[in-house]
């Protein structure tokens, strides 16, 4: 048996390596605290679960249209208009099995051999892997905590070549929590004017914002940005629906939408019919009180975690504006984040993800999407590890 050559483009997951080691140590009876998960520790709100139960009881258990049922797509349209003043039609929306699936579809549709995709680093681990699998070339723009982990319009301009097909933005960011302002997005949009470059805007964490900051959708900042932006979103993070697998895209480019429906129709067909009906409840705002409850809990944890890390000599972290991660700077200690994280796990039973996994050495990602007692104990162990090594 010979595995297809295209699989050689995919790199092994560093995140999975840490997770596997944590699982192995836990099986040996060791006390493991994990801060590597990218999902809320809260349960899906009851109002959404009840909608799913009702959908089952009402018999919504058949195939649906590949791109999603009309009611779900309309709920997405209404949500984007209500939250960001964006105007889409039914032919502008495709519902997929999570935002990761949405991204995969997009890259498969648009990227050909040698096409370049500009990706700010640190980045979500999946971005460059999907680009490479599609025979594209990821082009990274480096950032760090001195620039709040955000790229400038000038950096974007410098990265553009005649092969650039897509600029991928993620705000709020996984793994840094960085959020782009309206002014920053406008400046990036000015650089893109007159080009055919698309913007993929991953806005999965838009509801998880801190310190009174307001989220700005990339497509909302100008008419030109609206036309070139494919908004990618879902319900996994904001409404604690990770296992339900619900993602979607919105774009005025109907040719792109039709092609995506054609591809998805031959791969997965529709998203789970029950999930689609439950999603309507979330998109219509019936779980907004639950979203705010979770956001406040994350904010409290964030403030305690940031202060605790910055009290450790040799470690620092800037305050994230959104999402539920800290990207912790360990450059004073080591430039080998993988070795640091493996040793921390083996010595202290604390699992965090090395910055290497996100394309940036000298950091680790710490998820505070877990209970406060575990966060405090985990940071205490990290402090002890640093002070004794």
Image (tube, grey):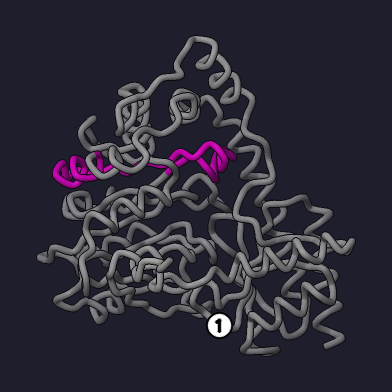
Res 195 quadrant in image: bottom left
Q: Residue furthest top?
A: 58
Magenta-drawn stretch contains 240: yes
In this rendering, position of residue 96 left or right of residue 53: left
Looking at this view, is 29 or 364 the one in front? 29
Question: In the image, residue 318 lies at what x, y percent?
Answer: 60, 71
Q: Is the residue 184 above or below the residue 276 in the image?
A: below
Image quarter (top left, top right, bottom left or bottom right) of the N terminus: bottom left
Q: Is residue 28 above or below residue 274?
A: below
- In this view, 57 is above or below 297: above
Q: Residue at x 84, y 84 (%)?
A: 387
Q: Position of residue 75 (x, y in %)?
A: 37, 27
Please name whichever residue, 267 or 164, is drawn nearer the observer in this view of the structure: 267
Secondary structure found at label 1:
loop
At a point 31% along the width and 51% down the height, the residue shown is 105
Stretch in magenta:
234-261
**Residue at 31% in and 61% down:** 185
Q: Return the residue at label 1.
A: 361
Left-right relation of 112 to 339 = left
* Residue appearing at x 26%, y 45% in the figure: 263
Q: Nearer the viewer, residue 256 or 303?
A: 256
Q: Quadrant of the C terminus?
A: bottom right
Please provide percent x and percent y for residue 21. 72, 68
Q: Quadrant of residue 224?
A: bottom left
User: How far from the left and from the top, in percent, is residue 141?
Assistant: 37, 78
Q: Is residue 67 highlighted in magenta?
A: no
Say few, some or many: other residues with alpha carbon within 10 Å of mark 1 (under 14 / 14 to 19 / 20 or more): many
Whether 319 is drawn above or below 50: the answer is below
Q: Can you see residue 184?
A: no
């Amino acid at each position: 048996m010979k595995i297809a050559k295209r699989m050689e483009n995919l790199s092994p997951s560093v995140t999975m390596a840490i997770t596997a080691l944590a699982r192995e140590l836990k099986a040996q009876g060791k006390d493991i605290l994990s801060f590597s998960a990218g999902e809320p520790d809260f349960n899906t709100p009851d109002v959404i679960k009840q909608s799913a139960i009702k959908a089952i009881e009402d018999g919504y258990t058949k195939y649906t249209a590949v791109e999603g049922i009309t009611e779900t797509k309309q709920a997405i349209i209404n949500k984007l208009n209500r939250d960001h003043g964006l105007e889409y039609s039914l032919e502008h929306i495709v519902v997929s099995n999570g935002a990761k699936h949405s991204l995969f579809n997009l890259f498969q549709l648009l990227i050909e051999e040698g096409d370049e995709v500009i990706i700010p680093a640190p980045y979500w681990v999946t971005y460059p892997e999907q680009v490479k699998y599609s025979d594209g070339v990821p082009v990274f723009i480096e950032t760090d905590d001195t620039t709040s982990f955000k790229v400038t319009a000038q950096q974007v301009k410098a990265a553009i070549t005649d092969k650039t097909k897509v600029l991928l933005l993620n705000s709020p960011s996984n793994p840094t929590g960085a959020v782009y302002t309206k002014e920053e997005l406008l400046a990036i949009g000015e650089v893109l004017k007159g080009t055919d470059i698309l913007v993929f805007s991953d806005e999965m964490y838009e509801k998880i914002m801190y310190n009174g900051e307001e989220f700005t959708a990339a497509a909302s900042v100008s008419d030109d940005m609206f036309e070139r932006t494919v908004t990618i979103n879902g319900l996994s993070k904001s409404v604690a629906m990770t296992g339900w697998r619900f993602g979607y895209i919105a774009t005025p480019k109907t040719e792109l939408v039709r092609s995506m429906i054609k591809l998805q129709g031959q791969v997965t067909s529709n998203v789970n019919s029950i999930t689609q009906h439950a999603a309507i409840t979330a998109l219509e705002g019936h779980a907004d009180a639950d979203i705010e409850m979770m956001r406040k809990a994350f904010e409290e944890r964030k403030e305690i975690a940031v202060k605790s890390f910055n009290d450790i000599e040799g470690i620092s972290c800037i305050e994230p504006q959104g999402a539920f991660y800290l990207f912790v700077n360990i450059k004073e200690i080591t430039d080998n984040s993988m070795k640091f994280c493996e040793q921390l796990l083996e010595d202290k039973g604390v699992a965090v993800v090395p910055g290497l996994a996100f394309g940036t050495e000298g950091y680790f990602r710490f998820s505070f999407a877990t209970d406060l007692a575990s966060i405090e104990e985990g940071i205490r162990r990290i402090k002890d590890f640093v002070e004794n090594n």
